[in-house]
Amino acid sequence: MSLGLILIASSGLFSIGLLAALSRRHAIFMLIGIELMLAAANLNFVAFWRFGPPSPNPHGALFAIFSIAIAAAEAAVGLALVIAVYRHYRTTSVDRMTQLKG
Amino acid sequence: MNTAAFVVIAIFTLLGALAAATLPRLIHAALSLVVGFVGLAAFYILLGAEFVGLVQIFVYVGAVAVLIVFTILLTRREATERDPFNWLGAIVALAVFGGLLWTISHSDFVWQAHVPNQDLTVRRIGDALMTAYIWPLLCVGVLLTAAMIGALILVYEEK
Amino acid sequence: MNPWLLAQFLWIIPAIPLAASLVVLSLKSSRRKTAAAIAIGGQVAALILSIAVFVSTLGAREYRAFFNFTWFTAGYDHIQFGWLLDPLTAVMLVMVTLVSLCIFVFSVGYMADDEKFTRFFAYLSFFTAAMLGVVVANSLLLLFVCWELVGLASYLLIGFWIEKPSAAAAAKKAFITTRIGDLGFFLATTLAALLIFCGAMGKSGQFPLHVWLPDAMEGPTPVSALIHAATMVAAGVFLVARTYPLFAFGSVHGVTPSLTVVVWIGVITALMASLVAVAQVDIKRILAYSTVSQLGLMMVSLGVGGVAAGIVHLLAHAFFKALLFLGSGSVIHGCHGEQDIRKMGGLRTIMPVTFFTYAIGMMALSGVPLFFCGAWSKEAVLDATHHWPVSNLPWVLMIMGVLLTAFYMTRQMIYVFFGQPRSASAGAHESPSVMLIPLIVLAGCTVIFSVVLSPAWPWLESYLTGDHATLRWGDLLTSTVFVSLILVGAGIAAAAVIYRRFGGAIDPLQRAAPIVFRFLEERMWIDELYERTVVRFAKILAGLSDWLDRNVWDGFVRLFAAAGQLTGILTRGFDERGINAGVDEATTGARGLGWSVGRLHSGKVQGYLGVVAIGALALLLLLAWLA
């Protein structure tokens, strides 16, 4: 087991997350995709901590912990957004949410 | 032996994630996501960051996935509604994956076998949090508070 | 004042009325007072300057100063322009400006009801400017230029009431007829004196080019006074005097072929015009023919060698003829536009000031001696004529002319001012002061002039010729004085007797000799003769030229036009197909490109995310490749 393999796995996970975000119409799928991408990045951090030089503070792991916490906050806000939009526009299809046009 | 475990866990996780991305029914996808997260936690434990793995289970599986299921529940128009698949996104994702692969394969140092170093104990994490990472800790606290308030405001309905 | 310095700035005197004319032209036609003020102001300025110039030339003897500058050189020829200042110029300047000023003032009243009032003053100013230019010109070329401008101004003024067909015809007649004369002027460089005289004949209305002058009475009376009494017609006489050395070149006892021609033509003109004047019934036409006759007299004087006498008579004539014209204008104005003397009468009591001044003018013209200036100059002319070595006939005929002049003027006076008031006089009134004051001024000048001109003190003649002037009381009572007294008295008496009991019905002369009277009344049918011959020929020629122009030259022009059109069509085709199509393609492509790129801004977040992913990938690959 080497860093390379783990990196391949995490990039695969990232790509799957991107796939979910780009190719589905439902807003929640975008969120799922984002969560997957974040998770892949976390995996990267931990992997690099694991295979990096020894240091007194486990920077990689701690970063991953913080990242998880923030991901949770972001998921909460994002899902609240989806609910609010659903209430207003009666749709969850991102194709219809084109207010950012232009 | 580690490599075998790694491969199994990798397949498990990636399949779960793929299912989460591609399944037509939303609720199936959400549940597959849980599987993916669990696999990821296994990854962390394999790598020796047990605490991170546990945190992953607590937060991602216990909070985020549940939130997603709740939101699906709250935004249901038709439960059996099918979501079409956009192949352009697949192409982009594939391209990105290919690029990343190429980058990884062309770098040298990631392929060196390495002896994993220290253990990650809760004590060490606690020490780090209270000394080196005190400032990010406090910020994250504020952030979580703000996120909670923000989410509440977003869904608050005036009657 | 250094005369040479004075000569340098002589051009200002014609320039002021010219500037006034241009300013008045630019005014709106409602600004009448301003227009009149500017025009009259210009004249006053010119008059003051003229008097100043005149006074400064009094001191020197043989005064002659000029200022030349070279206009351009062509080969070995230097075309020069310049101004000349000598006694002739100085007196002419004073005469023209003074008489013009009186006429300008008169016109304020006479033309008061005319809607083209301001334009009239513009034309008047322009006319005087041109006339003054003729006077001060040093070179024949410049003189000719101003000469032509005078012709133009007279055309504009005679045809002032252009809406009247007779006026328009008269203006044309004047211009064309004088033009015929002017043609001769220009050829003067080759056929010198005679052709100069041709020009003088045209301008001064000598036979056979006199026909325009009576018709020119169509213009307003101030115009008649200005042009046909004082200034323009005098220009012909002035020209002969100015170029006298040319005429007198190679003379034997003062006789040359050119001068002889001048004399005979002058004689014929003088006699013929006086005869015709006897039978005319339009108040202005009588004066017009009188002018023609007097001009003939002046030409005779110049021809026989009495240049000074002729010029003196010219100056005197300017004053009293202008006075008579303005007086007739006053009469016409008072009779509300009536010009037929048969309809007037008894105006002596109704218009006393007009009558008085008119009488002064009439006596001056007739040659009543002592107090009226025309007498002295006329006698000087007769004296010179008497001493002509070639023949005595001119003298005899001139005497007849003097008789006739007195006769027809008295006839006119009786018709207009005496007897019972007839139709037009019934509602007549005296003219306003603005018209009367110039009359009085001119009348005064006439009387004063006679003192100046008296042979006892031949001051003006000496001034013009450069000799000394001595006081000779003895000359006051020469034989010529008695002869002229008798002649004038006879003429006046004859007219008084014949028209004594004139009731206004039929002219006694007409009753006595109807055929002769008819002949004279119809102006000897000269106009009709010209109409049948010259005019008809000119019309044929014009038709030929028109045909040529319309078919031949026009064909050439149309050919060029067609070529131009072809070029235009070719260019347009190229422009439309070639250039426009190219531009259209380019714009369509740009628009398509723009539209395609614009589609990126779809508003769909997934689209944005995809682009971001691609961008990040590209960046990543770049970094990896660089490392």
Image (spheres, rainbow, N blue to C red):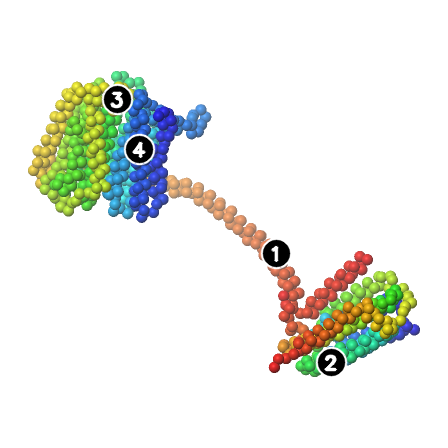
Comparing labels 4 and 2, the label whose residue is closer to the camera: 4
Report the residue marked by disc 1: C586
Task: Name the residue rendered at 19%, 19% in the picture.
Answer: C472
Which corner quadrant of the image does residue C582 belong to?
Answer: bottom right
Distance in Å between CA atoms under marks 4 and 1: 77 Å
Structural crowding at the residue carrying mark 1, measured as other residues with C-alpha within 10 Å and reported as few (<14), some (14–19) or many (≥20): few
State the quadrant of the C terminus of chain A.
bottom right
Which residue is more in the foreground, A78 or B92? A78
Q: Residue at x 83, y 77 (%)?
A: B54
Can see residue B15? no
Q: Amino acid at mark 2?
A: Val
Residue C569 vertical placement versus C358 (above, below): below
> Closest to the observer: C218 or C391?
C218
Q: Which residue is mark 4?
A: C48
Label 4 and label 2 in one chain: no
Q: Are marks 3 and 2 in contact (CB under 8 Å)?
A: no
Label 3 sits on residue: C462
Above-or-below relation of C609 to C260:
below
On the same chain, marks 1 and 3? The answer is yes
Relative to B155, is C526 on the left or the right? Answer: left
Please name which of the two marks, 2 or 1, marks the residue nearer to the observer: 2
At numbered mark 4, what does the secondary structure look like: helix, strand or loop?
helix
Q: CA distance from mark 4 to mark 2?
A: 116 Å
Q: Determine the CA span between mark 3 and mark 4.
A: 24 Å
Residue depth check, mark 3 versus mark 4: number of the one nearer the observer: 4
Q: Residues within 10 Å of mark 2 (few under 14, many from 20)?
A: some
